[in-house]
């Protein structure tokens, strides 16, 4: 171990990566920019339901249509029931007969400018008949007469055993007889952890431009999965897939929210009707209230020790999935919450179960580490509690029970790193947590073309702001032994020849990067290896001239299928935090942080560190600040003024260390995008307990929570 018709000039068929720092110069253009810079467009505003659960009686658009500048109004009655979804199609493009959450799209107004569209949307008169709502888990399990999706078994994507009624889905992982195992334990503890609703909160809003005039449809969208978007649009608009051209577009941040066609289908249908290009851009209130949120819920853990070993482990999660399951890609309709709480430790017998239920709240989806964030918080919190019960140091307890070499190396580095943190005064505590991150499944194909002037990589994955194209250029330059400036990346949008599963699940560098390396290997097979006698530099130019051909083209493939020998291996990390707690107020300050990572190959050192720092800040923000408040079905934190996000003043000094276990890890590309964020909450809860002896089991962790816990302990004393 070592330490077609084009609304603007930017709508080209391909988008070539600019090595001249477009990001920092402010010249990078996003979908919202395209929607704002041409007079040809109609602009769309949506009418959103004000009721969390109601029968839709009438949508009167006469006043809106009479407003000068309004061109069209579209309702669910106009287009009929059209359902979208990733694994289950249960989400109407526009509501037809019922609304199931406050914020559901009821109608759309197209006008000559955004202001007129929004004004007209407020003039649409919608009549509702309120129905009994299900606001929380207690309502769902206590009110048996309200069935939100009585026809669930008829949805496309439903399996033969698809749950009915108010159950979105269920997932089970069982390994052994857990009841018998608990009977053999000499120590058992049970804890329940509760987590609130939070949002992905990307900086760039959801936006799109759709031009459906004529035979083909052109789409510019902030959707992160161009190939699936094209398939969805073709299905929902009754068009041939080949008619839909999704152009490459910069995403500008995603964190899980930009994978559903919230805007694009309606814009396509309105463009067909009006024979004008149509644009839509969400306000931040719309984003917070109508797109994917992290599932709130509770997770009960019961864990037993036998002769010091973790002998039995039981987990039961109940999640509020909101009004629709459509945003989740997993066939179970349950986010990846199982298997992570004690993933880094040897456990003899496991029994883990999770369910997601329908409610009249905003739909739950995939937000950065969609279930891992909650389960690692619970698991690493309980590991500390077990250590304290056994009278063991938390790091030593973990070291004795982990079977993962990388985790052992991380813990040893953390132990050495935090030793100087001791003795800093009263009410100061140190907490640690370990965690892991896996790359998402899927396949990506990259085309590579060597010409006399450089190598061009053509990719289907859109850039969501992580600097992935710079990483691809570095990988290609290293593989081909050519200058980085000789490599260019072209984003092509949706393409039937270049398969790509999109930008998500921490798969881009590991999977698409592997496809880039594979493509370069195939180029070398065609060109032959570099020859020092050719003078270095961009040597393929001389080789192509000698071969008598202007260019050579190949394709490379990257894939990840978990369970296969060639699957991308997980990345592991550990985090230590030092906090000071004010016993009078409960307020706490994170004084310093140490993040230790066991990486694979670091393809882009700047991008690698950026992902770790960004993940840490993201996790910090959701651990201590973020709470998307929904009361009686209504969004309360409806703006970024109310929905608090971490800023630079909230971030403590962060030290990042690397450890390596085994020489083979040097050449492996691994995932890192969803690593650091999942460790902040448990490390913080453990540090607070170490400082003042109170355990916080809820997220987010606030000073008020700590004060209440201290007050409760004081009263009990």
Image: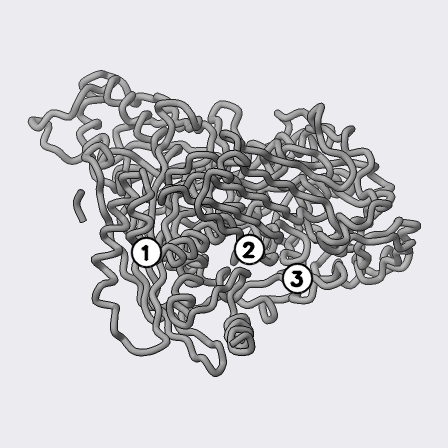
Q: Nearer the viewer, residue 666 or 490?
A: 666
Instruction: Give neighbour class at mark 1: few <14, some 14-19, many 20+ (Cα, 10 Å).
Output: some
Q: Which of 621 and 556 is in front in this view?
A: 621
Q: Residue furthest left?
A: 533
**Residue at left offset 63%, top offset 66%:** 639
**Residue at left offset 59%, top offset 45%:** 317
How far across and how far down the image is residue 179, in percent?
Answer: 55, 36
Q: Do the residues labelled 3 and 2 touch (CB within 8 Å)?
A: no
SS for dot 1: loop
**Dot placed on the residue nearer the N-terminal end, 3 or 2:** 2
**Dot placed on the residue nearer the N-terminal end, 1 or 3:** 3
Dot 2 corresponds to which residue? Answer: 193
Q: Which of 615 and 359 is in front in this view?
A: 359
Q: Quadrant of residue 660?
A: top left
**Residue at left offset 47%, top offset 39%:** 312
**Dot placed on the residue nearer the N-terminal end, 1 or 2:** 2
**Label 1 to label 3: alpha-carbon separation:** 48 Å
SS for dot 2: strand
Horizontal side, residue 592 vs residue 101: left or right? left
**Label 3 to label 2: alpha-carbon separation:** 29 Å
SS for dot 3: helix
Dot 1 corresponds to which residue? Answer: 392
Dot 3 corresponds to which residue? Answer: 285
How far across and how far down the image is residue 330, in percent?
Answer: 58, 34
Task: For marks 3 and 2, give the one nearer the viewer.
Answer: 2
**Label 1 to label 2: alpha-carbon separation:** 23 Å
Residue 381 against residue 670 in the figure, above or below: below
Instruction: Give neighbour class at mark 2: few <14, some 14-19, many 20+ (Cα, 10 Å).
Output: many
């Amino acid at each position: 171990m070592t330490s077609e018709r084009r609304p603007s000039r930017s709508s080209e068929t391909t988008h070539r990566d600019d090595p001249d720092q477009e990001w920092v110069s402010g010249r990078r253009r996003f979908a919202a920019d395209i929607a704002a810079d041409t007079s040809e467009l109609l602009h769309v505003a949506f009418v959103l339901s004000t009721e969390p659960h109601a029968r839709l009686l009438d949508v009167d658009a006469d006043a809106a249509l009479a407003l000068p500048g309004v061109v069209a109004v579209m309702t669910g009655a106009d287009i009929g029931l059209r359902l979208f979804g990733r694994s289950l199609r249960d989400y109407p493009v526009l509501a037809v007969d019922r609304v199931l959450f406050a914020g559901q799209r009821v109608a759309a107004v197209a006008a000559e400018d955004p202001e007129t569209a929004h004004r007209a949307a407020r003039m649409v008169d919608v009549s509702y008949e309120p129905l009994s709502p299900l606001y929380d888990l207690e309502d769902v399990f206590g009110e048996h007469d309200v069935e939100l999706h009585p026809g669930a078994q008829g949805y496309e994507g439903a399996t033969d055993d698809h749950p009915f009624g108010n159950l979105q889905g269920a997932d089970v992982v069982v390994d052994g007889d857990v009841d018998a195992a608990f009977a053999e334990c000499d120590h058992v503890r049970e804890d329940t952890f509760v987590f609130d609703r939070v949002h992905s909160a990307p900086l760039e809003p959801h936006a799109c431009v759709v031009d459906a005039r004529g035979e083909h449809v052109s789409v510019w969208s902030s959707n992160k999965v161009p190939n699936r978007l094209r398939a969805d649009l073709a299905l929902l608009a009754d068009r041939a897939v080949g008619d839909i051209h999704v152009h490459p577009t910069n995403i500008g941040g995603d964190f899980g929210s930009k994978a559903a066609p919230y805007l694009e289908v309606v814009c396509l249908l309105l463009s067909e009707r009006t024979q004008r290009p149509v644009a839509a851009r969400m306000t931040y209130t719309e984003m917070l209230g109508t797109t994917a949120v992290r599932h709130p819920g509770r997770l009960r853990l019961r864990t037993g020790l036998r002769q010091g070993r973790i002998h039995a482990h039981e987990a039961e999660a109940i999640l509020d999935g909101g009004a629709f399951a459509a945003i989740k890609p997993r066939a179970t309709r349950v986010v990846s919450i199982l298997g992570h709480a004690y993933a880094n430790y040897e456990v003899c017998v496991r029994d883990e179960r999770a369910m997601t239920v329908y409610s009249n709240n905003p739909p739950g989806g995939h937000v950065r580490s969609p279930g891992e964030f909650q389960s690692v918080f619970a698991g690493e919190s309980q590991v500390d509690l077990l250590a304290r019960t056994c009278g063991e140091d938390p790091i030593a307890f973990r070291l004795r029970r982990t079977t993962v070499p990388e985790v052992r190396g991380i813990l040893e580095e953390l132990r050495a790193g935090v030793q100087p943190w001791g003795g800093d005064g009263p009410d100061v505590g140190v907490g640690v947590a370990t965690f892991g991150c896996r790359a998402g499944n899927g396949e990506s194909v990259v085309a590579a073309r060597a010409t006399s002037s450089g190598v061009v990589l053509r990719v289907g994955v859109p850039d969501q702001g992580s600097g992935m194209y710079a990483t691809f250029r570095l990988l290609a330059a290293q593989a081909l032994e050519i200058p980085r400036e000789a490599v260019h990346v072209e984003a092509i949008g949706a393409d039937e020849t270049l398969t790509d599963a999109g930008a998500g699940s921490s798969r881009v560098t590991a999977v698409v990067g592997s496809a880039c390396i594979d493509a370069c290997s195939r180029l070398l097979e065609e060109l032959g290896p570099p020859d020092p006698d050719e003078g270095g530099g961009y040597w393929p130019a001389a080789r192509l001239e000698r071969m008598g051909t202007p260019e050579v083209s190949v394709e490379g493939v990257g894939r990840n299928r978990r369970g296969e020998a060639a699957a991308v291996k997980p990345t592991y990390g550990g985090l230590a935090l030092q906090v000071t707690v004010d016993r009078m107020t409960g307020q706490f300050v994170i004084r310093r942080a140490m993040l230790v990572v066991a990486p694979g190959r670091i393809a882009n050192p700047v991008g690698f560190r950026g992902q770790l720092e960004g993940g840490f800040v993201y996790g910090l923000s959701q651990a201590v600040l973020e709470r998307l408040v929904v009361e009686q079905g209504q969004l309360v934190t409806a703006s970024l003024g109310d929905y608090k996000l971490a800023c630079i003043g909230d971030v403590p000094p962060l030290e990042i260390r690397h450890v390596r276990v085994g020489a083979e890890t040097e050449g492996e590309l691994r995932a890192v995008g969803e690593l650091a964020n999942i460790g902040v909450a448990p490390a913080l809860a453990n540090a607070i307990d170490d400082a003042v002896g109170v355990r916080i089991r809820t997220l987010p962790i606030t000073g008020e929570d700590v004060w209440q816990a201290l007050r409760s302990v004081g009263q009990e004393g």
